[in-house]
Amino acid sequence: MDTLILKNLKSLRRFHRLTRAEFATAVGVSESLVSLTEAAKRDPTAGYIARVCEAFHVEPNVMYGVDLAAGVLHYPPCECRATEGGDDGQP
């Protein structure tokens, strides 16, 4: 399991100050899937990542931490600006 993608998925949700339920609704998946993915109990599928990217206008390479233009790994913008918060589903 790629921990960077998991970290970035959670950071994206927190950046937008969404609960897990709100994030799930925006992406079109169940809250359970969001929760299991964030807890690293389920790997995010390519389809799930694609839905997240489409819903939040993020390039998949950014979610994976790869800057294809520069050919290097980096932290995406959502990671740098993530808000603090607990794992209780709140932003």
Image: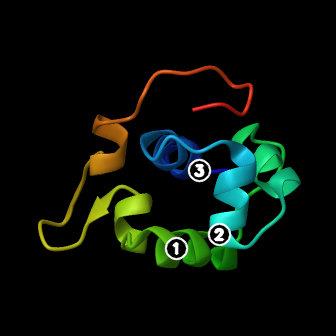
Q: How far separated are the C-alphas under marks 1 and 2?
A: 6 Å
Q: Amino acid at mark 3?
A: Asp
Q: Amino acid at mark 1?
A: Ala
| Front-most of residues 4 and 79 | 79
Q: Classify 10 Å Cα crowding around label 1: few (below 14), some (14-19), many (20 and above).
A: few
Which mark is in front, 1 or 3? 1
Q: How far separated are the C-alphas under marks 3 and 2?
A: 20 Å
Q: Is residue 29 above or below residue 18?
A: below
Q: Classify 10 Å Cα crowding around label 2: few (below 14), some (14-19), many (20 and above).
A: many
Which residue in the protein does label 2 denote?
27
Image colouring: rainbow
Q: Is residue 79 above or below residue 28?
A: above
Which residue in the protein does label 3 denote?
2
Q: Residue at x 64, y 76 (%)?
A: 46
Q: Residue at x 53, y 52 (%)?
A: 5
Q: Earlier in the sequence, mark 1 or mark 3?
A: 3
Q: Amino acid at mark 2?
A: Val
Q: Earlier in the sequence, mark 3 or mark 2?
A: 3
Kindly state the secondary structure of the residue where label 2 is placed.
helix
**In-image side of 12 versus 26 (left or right):** left
Kindly state the secondary structure of the residue where label 3 is placed.
loop
Q: Residue at x 12, y 66 (%)?
A: 70
Label 3–label 2 contact, CB within 8 A: no
Label 1–label 2 contact, CB within 8 A: yes
Which residue in the protein does label 1 denote?
55
Q: Position of residue 91 (x, y in %)?
A: 57, 32
Q: How far separated are the C-alphas under marks 1 and 3?
A: 21 Å
Q: Position of residue 36 (x, y in %)?
A: 82, 46
Q: Position of residue 82 (x, y in %)?
A: 39, 34
